[in-house]
Image (cartoon, grey):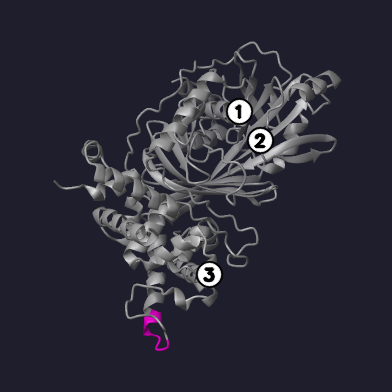
Amino acid sequence: MVESIPLTWEEVARVYGRKIYNFAYRLTGNADDAHDLVQEVLLRVRRGLANYQPGSFEGWLWRITRNAFLDEIRKRKRRPTSPLPDEIDRWDVATSDPADVEYARITLGDDIQKALLELPIEFREAVVLCDVIGLSYEEIARAVSVPIGTVRSRIHRGRRMMRELLT
Amino acid sequence: MKRLVSLVVVFILMPASAAWATELEELLEQSRESAYTAEQIISCSTPDGVRDAVVRIAQSSGEIRMTSTVAGDIEVSSGDGGWTLSRQGGVVSSASVDSEDMAPIEPLYVVEDAGTADFLGREVTVHQLIRDGVLRAELVFDDETGVLVTATTFTASGDTYCERRFVSFDPTDPMLESPDFLEAEVLQPRSEVETLLPESVGGFDRLDFYEDEDGLRFAYYSDGFFSFAVFETPTIVALPDAKTIQFGEAVYQRTFTAGQVTYVWETRSGGMALLGDLPPDLHESVLATLPPPQDPGILRRLWRSLFG
Amino acid sequence: MTHPSELISAYLDGELIEDETSELLSHLATCGRCSADLEEMQAVRAAVRSLPILELPAGLLPEADAAAVPIHRNRGVWVGAAAAAVALIIAIASIVTPPPASISADDLSSRFGARASLDPAFSPAKVVVPVLGSLSE
């Protein structure tokens, strides 16, 4: 008798939900998109758990999260009414709630979030995974499927760009 | 060495049921000797709410090191009579004890083989621990390495109490360096014991009794699988974020972590505490056999209100 | 002369190997530009890390009392005069004020844990990391 003992997706949701939400929020800058992304990720986890190959669980989870995020970007780029500029790797602040563009009342946290949104996607996700989620370079490398040297370089260049944007 | 002798004694004297207990001990011994790294999710359903934790585990040479990703940098290193807790890289608490060469506990648990299964792509075998006809634990061991990959404990009504499950597993030896234990002496158990703590509590036998130079006394109880310690402390131990819980007329402070309960209370002679991994349905009966909470007396209350 | 600026970022995250660390530190000792770079990089890093961790909006997860893993960020390296001063103060305080004689819950855990490690049932099911409360902190 051979049967599987699955990890339940509710367990994954409960334990990792907040991390995924914060990753999504900092990457998109907006709560609705983050909400949708979390739901999409959990859906994919639910479907994918049956085929989960043993290895690093967190790495697998972050890959799913990233793919869901990138798929959403590609979807938006294809939408004819999108006001986005041609670059695929930006979520324009203007696409979120117009009230956000009330510069007079922007707090430091908002400045940082806006600067993050100016970064190219690869740099933004590396910085968020490192400084918001708290993954090590190795964990980020696994999640993003690039060598550690690339992770190092992306975080460095992302922070460089943020420094320019924040001064 | 000593343990091996007592195993043989058990086998000769009580062949039938001893075979079950020995099999459990054999499985657990194999698990103790393995080396690997893993990530584990612990999820407990306690009367005070859900308790979850995600830990990284490294085991090698009889030592288990657990790092928690919860609430800051916590690491526990344990094995061979030692236990060290570090927070943010600094050692917070450490202890080192020895054990008496005890006569074996009469085996309470019947071990039933519940078949093989597939877990994280590996072949595993499921064992059920049954006590007095009640399923108390389900243990899943990896066939190749003998590692305990899943452990689930149950209350008497069949509800899950705690579930621990590996979500990733690497049987490579992590080659742990020996931890920096503080210069603590190894605390020896006492052979002559004068204490109010009973010798046996609901199937849990008192195996060791200790007293250290600060006046802290404690007894270690086990039923062959679950275990707990009862402490006598000079004053009541402060238990952060505790809930007040009442059993009959007795009032205690209690916290649950993922996998362990702590009760503290006060008697006329000082403070008391109980820590262990026994399921919640056993708590009330165990506490009922221990010295009950008592009013510490006017003088003590006055002292405390003056000096905190 | 090359400036190992990429090492600076990784150094702050505690991700350098020993050789790289000594190479960087000896460079910083003589290079004002890179020392300034280090400070600015640290400020950016600290800024992003200062972003609040957001709570999950209601109804997003299956269970009412969804407990989640609090986000813990890797330690990295603390540099700079302010940090050094704080470390010194903490060190002085621990010498001057002797630790309280009272017993803490961690002391109970350590003694129980030590004896439990001698139990035949000692296994990943027996070692407990004494984290108080649930994960929803």
Q: Amino acid at mark 1?
A: Leu
- Label number found at residue C125: none
Residue B297: x and y in percent read 84, 21
Q: Amino acid at mark 3?
A: His
Residue identifier under label 3: A35
Q: Do marks 3 and 2 share a subunit?
A: no
Q: Is residue B143 magenta?
A: no
Point 46% across, 24% down: residue? B4
Location of residue B280 in the rendering, given as x and y in whole percent from the top left corner: 69, 42
Q: Secondary structure at mark 3?
A: helix
The chain under label 1 reads: C
Q: Is residue B171 visible?
A: no
- Dot 3 and dot 2 residues touching (CB under 8 Å): no
Picture coordinates of residue A67, whole percent (x, y): 38, 69
Residue with the mark numbered 2? B262
- Position of residue B80 relative to residue B165, above or below, is above
Q: CA distance from mark 3 to mark 2?
A: 38 Å
The image shows residue B135, relative to residue A68, as above or below, that is above
The residue where tag 1 is placed is: C108
Magenta span of residues: A75-81
Residues under numbered marks 1 and 2 in contact, where contact means CB atoms less than 8 Å apart: yes
Do we see residue A59 in this rendering? yes
